[in-house]
Image: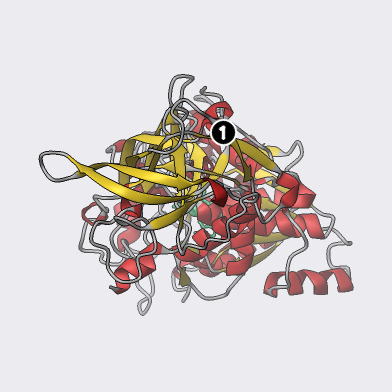
Amino acid sequence: MNNKMLESGNSSENFPSKPKNFIREIIDEDMKTNKWGGRVHTRFPPEPNGYLHIGHAKSICLNFGIANDYNGKFNLRFDDTNPSKEEQEYVDSIIEDIRWLGADFEDRILFASDYFEQMYEWAVKLIKKGKAYVDDLSADQIRGLRGTLTEAGKESPFRNRTVEENLDLFERMRKGEFENGEKVLRAKIDMASPNINLRDPVMYRIVHSEHHRQGTKWCIYPTYDWAHGLEDSIEGITHSICTLEFENHRPLYDWFLDELGIYHPQQIEFARLNLSYTVMSKRKLLRLVQEKYVDGWDDPRMPTVSAFRRRGYTPEAIINFTDIVGVAKRDAMTDIALLEYAIRDDLNKHAQRVMAVLDPLKIVITNYPAGAVEELEAINNPEDPSMGSRKIPFSNEIYIEKSDFMENPPKGFHRLVPGGEVRLRYAYIIKCEEVIKNDKGETIELRCTFDADTKSGTGTSNKKVKGTIHWVSAKHALNAEVRLYDRLFTVEEPDADKEKDFIELLNPDSLKIIPKAMIEPSLKSSRPGDRFQFERLGYFCVDYKNSSDEKLVFNRTVTLKDSWVKSNKK
Ligand code: ATP
Ligand code: MG
């Protein structure tokens, strides 16, 4: 049972028209003035050095949502300009995640590395214009001369090489005549610019390393600053939407495009998504994976798209969440409870409800004939009558949740107590007649009687009790492993304290494994990826990594209510 359940979302259904935001207002205006000839073309440009996280999902939903609503196009472009950290595994996972979200890039899976030749020619063009030069300073020396916010930088002694010398050296850089770090190509702009990004930024560095697609064809690699705007230009992107940290780089991108005189997309910046109780930097997520604090990038506690899929989140809920968060111009922290709300809201409508007992206490119903079995009618989802109903078996031995019985209950406890009555969901009212204990004084079994006239739906009795609890028939129930997840970190902003290693803030109780839960027999046919509400307990999804034909493993997707807020306010 290791086939991943991939329901690739249907774009138009998953992405209903979106509320206006400042980016859409800009595009509306562009459409009015016919700035791009009625075209809208967006892209998502991940670096393939990790799995996608919820912040990336936000960017995908934003970019694809816009293309979808304006009859435009959406490109998936891998920004694979850094050979040392990139791997095919990441490329594959990114494609899978975007398809699952339902963002349709058609056949446009593009790679920045395919533009290396064009970028090289453009670099030569800048050298010929006297706008770029080969520098022999080391990275440290360059940093040392860059200046500060209040102080101008100093020019490199190699800044005034002739065009011929620069052309020759740059060609020899490409040919592999120099070692890593021996030379770089820099733009010749202005070492005194108030914008540090314009102080002769590096365009190419030497990296003798194998590239996942280009092999050893190249040993010079473009920097992000040089490459990014060119990639958008080559693809004819109209609106190049990126996060706020690139606002100060925009004048540099503009400079490159204008000096080259090539097609010039419009860059628009928005605030990145930050989520509480987790980290989103790929470097940190990679560390969690490599040092095995989690079980891979898709460990259900990770904030990655693949983890969310494994945990049972739906694409619709993720998309809805990104819409609720909206698009802002200022950075803020989004409460993870909002994401959980969106998941719950969606699963409430669509997940089938079933009964499962996580911490079983056996009950023998003494006046129910031993060996008799009755099939009772249970509704699959009261929110959606079209989901119908199913039969669940009832017999003289059942399991209930240990916590649904109390010998010395506090006031207001409406479940089972000695001599008290409770309703079994979809079944009968039972009365607790006897409590059986082991030598340690722990309750191990209850003896109850049932009232045959109180059968759900058809019973003639109008007896009323305050509590209704879930149960499963002991001899029919299946065994399953259930995994309960909590926040990955104990604090809202694990990144906040720069002095502290974020690993110290991991929540030691983020995973609790229940090896032997009892679940109703209708779940026998469930498949990896199937989602359920276990009545009164939460939403659960069949794990595709650990389930087998012999053993079902369920991941808790989300609790029924926000228990975290409650328990923290105690
Ligand atoms: P790193 O963690 O290494 O800095 P990154 O998260 O920026 O990397 P990229 O692969 O460069 O990773 O991101 C691809 C796209 O996703 C970029 O356009 C980026 O703006 C966007 N993006 C990344 N993180 C977020 C976020 N938290 N919120 C919104 N968009 C994001
Ligand atoms: Mg980045």
Residue at image point 41% right, 48% down:
282
Q: Name the residue under label 1.
A: 374
Q: Tag 1: Cα neighbours inside 10 Å, few (<14), some, or many (≥20)?
A: few
**Residue 396, quarter of the rendered image:** top left
Q: Quadrant of the C terminus?
A: bottom left
Q: Can residue 337 be seen in this view?
A: yes
Residue 54 coordinates in the image, percent (x, y)? 52, 53
**Left or right: 273 in relation to 155:** right
Judging depth in this view, the residue of 485 and 272 nearest the camera is: 485
Residue at image point 52% right, 24% down:
215
Judging depth in this view, the residue of 499 and 553 nearest the camera is: 553
Q: Is residue 129 visible?
A: no
Residue 433 coordinates in the image, percent (x, y)? 32, 49
Label 1: which secondary element: strand
Q: In this view, does 508 lie above or below 294?
A: below
Q: Is residue 523 above or below residue 101?
A: above
Q: In this view, does 367 lie above or below 191?
A: above
**Left or right: 264 in relation to 98:** right
- Looking at this view, name the residue that lies furthest to the bottom: 150
Q: Cβ(mark 1) to ligand 1 < 8 Å?
A: no
Residue at image point 84% right, 58% down:
39
Q: How is the image coloured?
A: secondary structure
Residue 23 coordinates in the image, percent (x, y)? 69, 70
Residue at image point 68% right, 38% down:
8
Identity of the amino acid at label 1?
Answer: Glu
